[in-house]
Amino acid sequence: MSRDDKSRRPGIIAAILTLDARRSLLDSVSPRYPVVYAHHLTLAFRPAEATYEKYAAFLGKPCLIRVMEEVWDGQGQAVRVSIETAGAESNCPHITVSCVDSVAPKYSQKLLANAAASSRPLSLQLGAVICFMTFREWDKRFSPQPSKTSPPSPPKT
């Protein structure tokens, strides 16, 4: 582990969809693949202290996510989004909806950069809460869910 890794927080800052927002997303965008996610927009992964401090004022607060487009190919499905909270940003704002079994959700970043991927425009607003979760908390709450199971519940605020 490098010195830089030690100065990072072991977790994720994300906008976690409310249960109603997740239902709305899944009603509008049917999962195309068996492993369903559709629960968050990552804002910072293993954030440096300065990044964590930037988001600290937003933690536990509601935000609005605008869904603009569904994108998919033979391996994954995501929606391109923007976050409507001042100061909150993401390099490749998206919510991974579903993937095939052998594909990790981070594949969505490549998917959104693929000009050959299929897409369709969407107009949807989703409520979320900005949270920081350690990797252990994240794994307990958001392990991949086959589409036939019930969705994970959002964190308490």
Image (cartoon, rainbow, N blue to C red):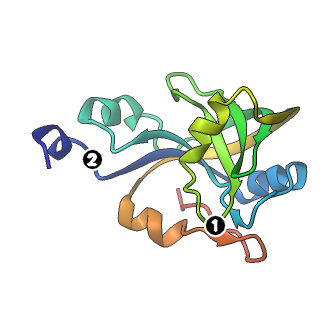
> Compared with residue 147, is residue 91 higher up or lower down, i.e. above or below?
above
Q: Horizontal and vertical percent for residue 17?
A: 66, 51
Can residue 51 be seen at all in this image of the molecule?
A: yes
Expressed as whole percent of the image width and height from the top left, the position of residue 19 reads: 72, 60
* Total marks in image: 2
Quarter of the image where one finds residue 3: top left
Q: Earlier in the sequence, mark 2 or mark 1?
A: 2
- Of residue 30 and residue 150, the one placed in the foreground of this image is 30
Residue at far top of view: 86
Label 1 Cα crowd, 10 Å radius (few <14 / some 14-19 / many 20+)? some
Mark 1 = which residue?
101
Residue at x 54% of width, y 69% of height: 143
Question: Quick one: which residue is furthest to the bottom in this view?
Answer: 149
**In this rendering, the label closer to the viewer, 2 or 1:** 1
Disc 2 to disc 1: CB gap under 8 Å:
no
Tell me, yes or no, if residue 60 can be seen here.
Answer: no
Which type of secondary structure does the marked residue at label 1 adopt?
loop
Q: Amino acid at mark 1?
A: Asp
Q: 10 Å neighbourhood of mark 2: few (<14), some, or many (≥20)?
A: some
Compared with 154, 65 (above or below) is above
Give the side of residue 80 with respect to residue 23, left or right.
left
Q: Amino acid at mark 2?
A: Arg
Furthest residue toward left: 3
Secondary element at image label 2: loop
In the rendered image, the vertical position of residue 71 relative to residue 135, given as above or below: above
Between residue 133 and residue 142, name the one nearer to us.
Answer: 142
Residue under pointer 2: 9
- Foreground residue among 148 and 53: 148
